[in-house]
Image (cartoon, rainbow, N blue to C red):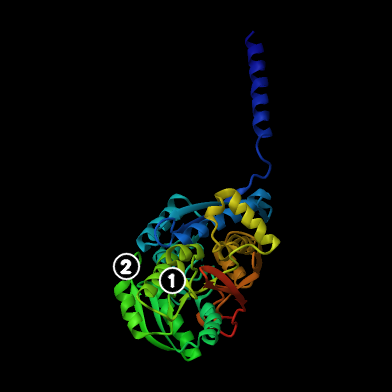
Amino acid sequence: MKKNYWISGIIILSVLVGVFFLHQPVNAAEKIRVGVLSAQSGPAAPWGIPNARSIILEAEEINKKGGFKVGGKTYELEVMVYDHKYIPAESAKAANKAIFADKCNFLAIQGGAPTMAAIPLMNENKILSLNFAGGADQLIKKENPLLFIYNPSIEIMYASVFPVIKKRENIKTLVIVNPNDTSGKSGTAASKAAAAREGFKVLAEEFFERGSKDLTALLTRIVNQKPDLIDTSYTDPTTSALICKQARELGYKGSVLLAWGPDPAQVKKMAGPHAEKAYMSLAGPLDPKTDFQKKIYKAYLDKWGEKEWNSTIWSNYGLVASLVKGIETAQGLDPFKIAAALEKASWDTPVGKLRYGGSKLFGAKRHLLYPITLYQFQKEEPVFLGTLPIREDVLD
């Protein structure tokens, strides 16, 4: 009897083991974790939310196809989002959690100052990062060999946009307005350099603390100087719309350039008629044009709804394709080999094939080369003026 029990036990165990292995995936995909540190709340959230969502959407699209293979291994992407509120200290804290607790392989950080705060941790732990950040002159350095910037260059934006506005509005003088941080100071330097090329006289450089809701005193000083142009430079979408509104309420009649990733819906809502003739430099169209763009647009609406649509997704979508291209070329996850591959790579995005450049300004090809699309508010609606070519004489 005992023997029969023993034989029955062996049979049952064999069946259970067989069932277990039958349900295990063959060549199970290895997870690659991408930590996204961006403002999910606060005034910079109109940048941060679509920034994170674009990466999530693109990663999901790749995973639906079964991931990608390198050296006989199959990889899938897992995106982990951290809200740094565009506060450098919060970014450092989030980077610490992403690297040590959540074991992220790569990071994507929004904002120059938040990226700067995370650099010591990233360098120490050899983390490759693809960042949506201003202040490239402070970030792309020899001592930061694994740091890339995945957004349009403000240097290209100014080089492309200033000549157009100069011709349309006969600009001769301007005032530059920026947040009082690393990004803002870098934006002012870039604006001044472009202004010098065009022969503009810079009447003043103004700075404000991020999160400010009343800029009346600052704008009163500006309006009294009667500049032909107010350039909001690296100001976040919410505050740049506020500047447009409050400057007009103070009687300003000149031109306004909402220079860096403005949110047209936010401008319309906050500034309304005060936004008349304000220029906006954007990364891609407000509405999808190509089949590729329409596919992404549909996927975004299916997941988050039409009210959540934000056109800044175009400059964000493609980061994952860039990373995958680097991993495939490097044939593995060695961050230094991936970095070397990315400096020579190109990949498909919603606005065409893109690549990294910037050796003329930064000594390394680690800044995304991306064309700028120019709009102007007319009768409270953004009107397309054109997509401007990349000035490779400024940023190769």
Residue 75 visible in rendering? no
Residue at 41%, 56% (x, y): give it.
Answer: 41
Residue type, mark 2 in image: Asp
Tags 2 and 1 touching, CB below 8 Å: no
Instruction: Calculate the distance from the C-alpha at mark 2 to the C-alpha at mark 1.
Output: 16 Å
Is disc 2 surrounded by few (<14), some (14 to 19) or many (20+) residues within 10 Å?
few
Q: Nearer the viewer, residue 79 or 222?
A: 222
Residue where numbered disc 2 is placed = 214
Percent from the top left, x then y, of residue 286? 58, 65
Q: Is residue 327 left or right of residue 82?
A: right
Residue type, mark 1 in image: His
Name the outermost residue toward the bottom: 199
Q: Quadrant of the C terminus?
A: bottom right
Q: Quadrant of the N terminus?
A: top right
Residue 319 visible in rendering? yes
Is disc 1 surrounded by few (<14), some (14 to 19) or many (20+) residues within 10 Å?
many
Q: Nearer the viewer, residue 321 or 229?
A: 229
Query: Which badge, 2 or 1, is on the more N-terminal residue?
Result: 2
Percent from the top left, x then y, of residue 92? 39, 60
Name the outermost residue toward the top: 1
Residue at 37%, 85% (x, y): give it.
Answer: 226
Query: What is the number of the mark on residue 274?
Result: 1
Tag nearer the camera, 2 or 1: 1
Percent from the top left, x then y, of residue 153? 52, 75
Residue 234 lies, with reference to residue 41, above or below; the image says below
